[in-house]
Image (spheres, rainbow, N blue to C red):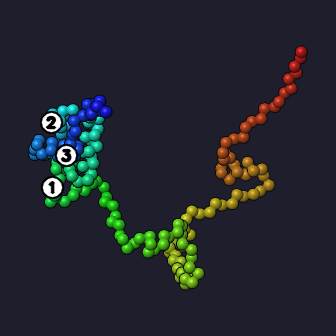
Amino acid sequence: MATAEVNKPPSLPPYPQMILAAIESLNEPNGSNKTSISKYIESKYGDLPAGHTTILSHHLNRMKDTGELVFWKNNYLKADPNSPPRRGRGRPPKPKDPMTGSDLTPARPRGRPPKDPNAPPKPVKPKVSSGSGKPRGRPRKMARPTGGMSGTTTAAMATGGRPRGRPPKEKTAMTEVSVEH
């Protein structure tokens, strides 16, 4: 038991208290940055835990989130109790309305709601002509002429001499090869 008491480091005040004391004593007009706060704590309290910088960063972030400190231009300042809270970036969240709780209204099911069979039918709009006499959209394809000739010559005649697409592959005549042993 005696060795545990000897190896025990001297008691340090809580980190938030040390941070606030450092900011007050440094008394910089634009606030104090993390390194100056850390150097002040090291000089005043001497023997600090091994992860001092990590612990300091954690407490600075927590104090900034709770509103005890204000982070402005990479410096930490004590929060002024009379100043309005600083807004973060982005759109603020919508306020929660206590009247629209899940107890009062049931949740709507997913998907499109079913048609109401008792609803009156929708009125039909009369078609309005464009005035030009032509139908709207792309015109229909003309049917291919069918005749007594073969399909390739008919297509060649219709298009003006040359058939459409890639020409057919020429088939070479197969010759038998005899293999002698």
Tell me how far mark 1 sits from mark 2, CA to CA. 26 Å
Question: Which quadrant holds the N terminus?
Answer: top left
The mark nearer the N terminus, 2 or 3, is 3
In the shown orientation, is residue 9 left or right of residue 141? left
On residue 44, the disc is: 2
Q: What amino acid is at disc 1? A: Asp
Element carrying mark 1: loop
- Residue 27 in view: yes
Q: Quadrant of residue 48?
A: top left
Residue at point 70%, 57% (across, down): 144
- Sequence-wise, which precedes: disc 1 or disc 2? 2
Residue 66 in the image, given as x and y percentages of width and height: 26, 53
Q: x, y (%) of residue 174?
A: 83, 30
Foreground label between 1 and 2:
2
Residue to which mark 3 is pinned: 17
Asked if residue 39 can be seen in this view, the reply is no
Tell me residue 151's x, y (percent): 75, 50
Q: CA distance from mark 2 to mark 3?
A: 13 Å
What's the amino acid at mark 3?
A: Gln
Which residue is at a point 27% across and 51% down the rendered structure image? 65
Choose top left, top right, bottom left or bottom right for residue 67.
bottom left
List x then y, in percent, for residue 56. Answer: 25, 40
Number of the label disc, if any, that sits on residue 80: 1
Q: Which circle's residue, 3 or 1, is located before the other in the chain?
A: 3
Q: Quadrant of residue 50?
A: top left
Rate crowding at label 3 as few (under 14), some (14 to 19) or many (20 or more) other CA atoms within 10 Å: few
Q: Report whether 152 appears left or right of 28.
A: right
Q: State yes or no: discs 2 and 3 in contact (Cβ < 8 Å).
A: no
**Which residue is located at x 50 percent, y 73 percent?**
130
Label 3 sits on a secondary structure element that is: helix
Q: State how many labels appear.
A: 3
Looking at this view, is 154 or 17 the one in front?
A: 17
